[in-house]
């Protein structure tokens, strides 16, 4: 085992959060076999039921099926437990894909800004402007304009994160471009694209991974907030935010319908944040100072 | 110093310009005819033609942008076809509750987080410090609306101490106003307490390692005075910076908090505007919030002059 990997796994918050994330991943992958039913199936005879309700559901084909709604049913008679379990898939995917998208875009723009002085002026002014718009507001606007679907929600959450990544990559490139190994490569007439890809990018990987985990954590939260406000994924899609949004109406009678998804949402975000903290400690001790 | 104020003012111009261009482009890049989008589903063909005329949609993109900026400079944010009112008027009508929430949250967060972070820095690794660090990680991982519901459940629904929802303007009685806002302040304040306390702790603990603290202790200054008069005052700049950074987070949080507590401010107006597909209002609100964010951060930068006499421009 490589020393970095050993150091990572012996870090308590990294190993703990990795374990938690593996459990969540297992839930997401195994969702259909975890005693769930179709998360979109509506049982109009049993809407807004409390946890543990036994009921006989009439299926669309006319047959009947005995069911136990572990966490109750929502305003359309959908099984909340199944919706939460299936919602794990959406949340984890949004977190990972948003992080990857914003890292890729930010990397590209940051390298351009850091390496080419002319692009720097223009790009950084644009980034400053984008950062002045509060992230959630920008995401809401983008979803409103583009329409709500999984790809548009991911783009809408990822774009407000791009300026921060761009800034980070730019500052890394600015310090790296004057390092002797880059100068050596340049004096050997290495093409700029190769210098950026082979010499600069690999040295920026550690802080980028750390940044990526924090983006993933905030993306999971933002997706839940957007859905909760009714501005995210369409309400029939099983997501934690949509379950909570549906529970808002009957909060005083069935507070659980809002609070049950929290039992996965908060551990998920907490685990990703702790993973980020741990990775930062191990991979990049100077990260905190570099951020400014 | 005047030169600094001036140059700092000038530096906001490109930021505001990029914000305006972004907002302008986002609406134009939307799929479909912008006039039809702005007019909404009830617009007649004549309405759409009128909108196209007023926005100059038959002209070049640059020309359209100049019209947009010209209107913006005159304080004209466009017209909501849903409410049939100017957007600026709508914003003015609903800014009060939002200001009440935002300012109260900031005060609450500073009042709780700064002493907490300072005391944690005094005994790094102590129980208060560990509690605070645990709380601050948790604070970043719990959505605002969850904190809100966790407060509503015991305090409003069980004990009935505070109203569940709604808003009363301060002119109808300060007690009623505050009682409706206590829960929003705490709910929204949690994440800022987490953020601010963390930075205060780091900043104060750095200041505590300085020589002047040792000198102060050596000449017998009391522990409290060392902490609050010497360390905290010298740690003020990073703390105030984070208050400024927090404004963007605060605005996002206001949207959620106003929705949960049914407070008729700009945040709930944003959500309604999106649900109504009222694009001129969305556009106006994004511009308003972004400009407010820039203005507050400008004030934060200027406050450095007062906070740290060593900073001279």
Image (cartoon, grey):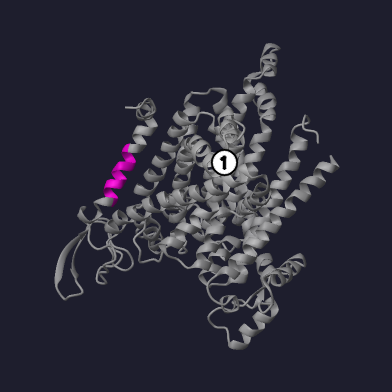
Chain of the residue under the numbered disc 1 shown in the image: A
Q: Is residue B270 magenta?
A: no
| Picture coordinates of residue A158, whole percent (x, y) | 49, 53
| Picture coordinates of residue A167, whole percent (x, y) | 59, 43
| Furthest residue in direction right, as rendered | B2
Front-most of residues B159 and A204: A204
Q: Secondary structure at mark 1?
A: helix
The residue beneath circle 1 is: A168
Which secondary structure is most common in the magenta stretch?
helix
How packed mark 1 is, by other alpha carbons closer than 10 Å (few <14, some 14-19, many 20 or more), is many
| Picture coordinates of residue B90, whole percent (x, y) | 66, 69
Front-most of residues B139 and A99: A99
Place residue A40 in its image quadrant: bottom left
From this view, report whether residue B237 is shown above or below residue A142.
above
Q: Is residue B188 left or right of residue A91?
A: right
Place residue B87 in its image quadrant: bottom right
In the rendered image, the quadrant that contains the C terminus of chain B is top right
Measuring 69% from the left and 29% from the top, which residue is drawn there?
A: B233
Instruction: Give, as a single range, the part of the protein colored magenta.
Output: A19-28
Measuring 47% from the left and 53% from the top, which residue is drawn there?
A: A222
From this view, report whether residue B34 is shown above or below residue B271.
below
Place residue B263 in its image quadrant: bottom right
From this view, report whether residue A254 is shown above or below residue B211.
below
| Picture coordinates of residue A245, whole percent (x, y) | 41, 61
Front-most of residues B301 and A160: A160
Asked if residue B5 can be seen in this view, the reply is yes
């Amino acid at each position: 085992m490589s020393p970095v990997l050993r150091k990572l796994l012996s870090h308590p918050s990294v190993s703990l959060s990795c374990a938690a994330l593996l459990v969540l991943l297992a839930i997401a992958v195994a969702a259909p076999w975890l005693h769930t039913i179709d998360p979109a199936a509506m049982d109009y005879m049993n809407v807004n039921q409390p946890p543990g309700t036994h009921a006989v559901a009439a299926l669309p084909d006319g047959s009947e099926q005995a069911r136990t709604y572990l966490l109750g049913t929502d305003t359309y008679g959908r099984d909340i437990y199944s919706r939460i379990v299936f919602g794990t898939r959406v949340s984890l995917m949004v977190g990972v894909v948003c992080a990857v998208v914003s890292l890729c875009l930010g990397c590209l723009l940051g390298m351009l800004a850091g390496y080419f002085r002319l692009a720097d002026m223009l790009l950084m002014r644009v980034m400053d402007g984008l950062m002045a718009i509060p992230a959630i507001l920008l995401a809401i606007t983008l979803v409103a304009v583009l329409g709500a679907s999984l790809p548009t929600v991911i783009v809408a959450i990822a774009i407000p994160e791009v300026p921060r990544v761009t800034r980070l990559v730019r500052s890394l490139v600015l310090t790296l471009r004057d390092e002797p190994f880059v100068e050596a490569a340049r004096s050997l007439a290495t093409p700029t694209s190769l210098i950026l890809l082979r010499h600069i990018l690999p040295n920026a990987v550690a802080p980028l991974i750390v940044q990526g985990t924090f983006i993933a954590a905030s993306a999971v939260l933002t997706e839940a907030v957007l859905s909760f406000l009714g501005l995210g994924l369409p309400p029939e899609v099983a997501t934690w935010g949509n379950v909570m949004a549906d529970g808002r109406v009957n909060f005083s009678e069935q507070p659980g319908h809002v609070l049950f998804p929290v039992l996965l949402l908060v551990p998920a975000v907490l685990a990703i944040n702790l993973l980020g903290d741990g990775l930062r400690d191990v991979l990049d001790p100077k990260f905190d100072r570099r951020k400014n | 110093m005047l030169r600094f104020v001036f140059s700092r003012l000038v530096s906001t111009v490109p930021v505001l310009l990029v914000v305006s261009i972004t907002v302008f482009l986002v609406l134009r890049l939307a799929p479909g005819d912008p006039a039809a989008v702005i007019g909404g589903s009830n617009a007649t063909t004549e309405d759409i033609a009128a909108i196209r005329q007023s926005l100059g949609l038959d002209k070049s993109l640059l020309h359209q942008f100049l019209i947009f900026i010209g209107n913006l400079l005159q304080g004209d944010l466009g017209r909501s076809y849903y409410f049939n009112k100017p957007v600026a008027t709508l914003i003015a009508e609903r800014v009060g509750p939002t200001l009440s929430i935002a300012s109260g949250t900031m005060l609450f967060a500073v009042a709780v987080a700064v002493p907490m972070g300072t005391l944690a820095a005094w005994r790094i690794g102590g129980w208060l410090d560990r509690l605070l660090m645990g709380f601050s990680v948790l604070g970043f991982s719990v959505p605002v609306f969850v904190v809100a519901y966790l407060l509503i459940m015991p305090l409003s629904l069980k004990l009935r101490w505070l109203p569940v929802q709604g808003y009363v303007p301060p002119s109808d009685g300060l007690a009623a106003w505050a009682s409706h806002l206590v829960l929003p302040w705490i709910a929204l304040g949690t994440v800022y307490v987490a953020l601010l306390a963390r930075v205060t702790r780091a900043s104060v603990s750095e200041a505590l390692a300085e020589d002047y603290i040792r000198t102060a202790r050596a000449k017998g200054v009391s522990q409290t005075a060392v902490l609050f008069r010497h360390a905290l005052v010298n740690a003020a700049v990073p703390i105030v910076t984070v208050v400024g950074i927090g404004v963007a987070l605060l605005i996002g949080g206001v949207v959620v908090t106003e929705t949960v507590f049914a407070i008729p401010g700009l945040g709930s107006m944003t959500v309604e505007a999106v649900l109504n597909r009222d694009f001129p209002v969305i556009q106006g609100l994004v511009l308003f919030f972004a400009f407010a964010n820039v203005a507050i951060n400008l004030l934060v930068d200027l406050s450095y002059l007062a906070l740290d006499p060593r900073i001279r421009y």
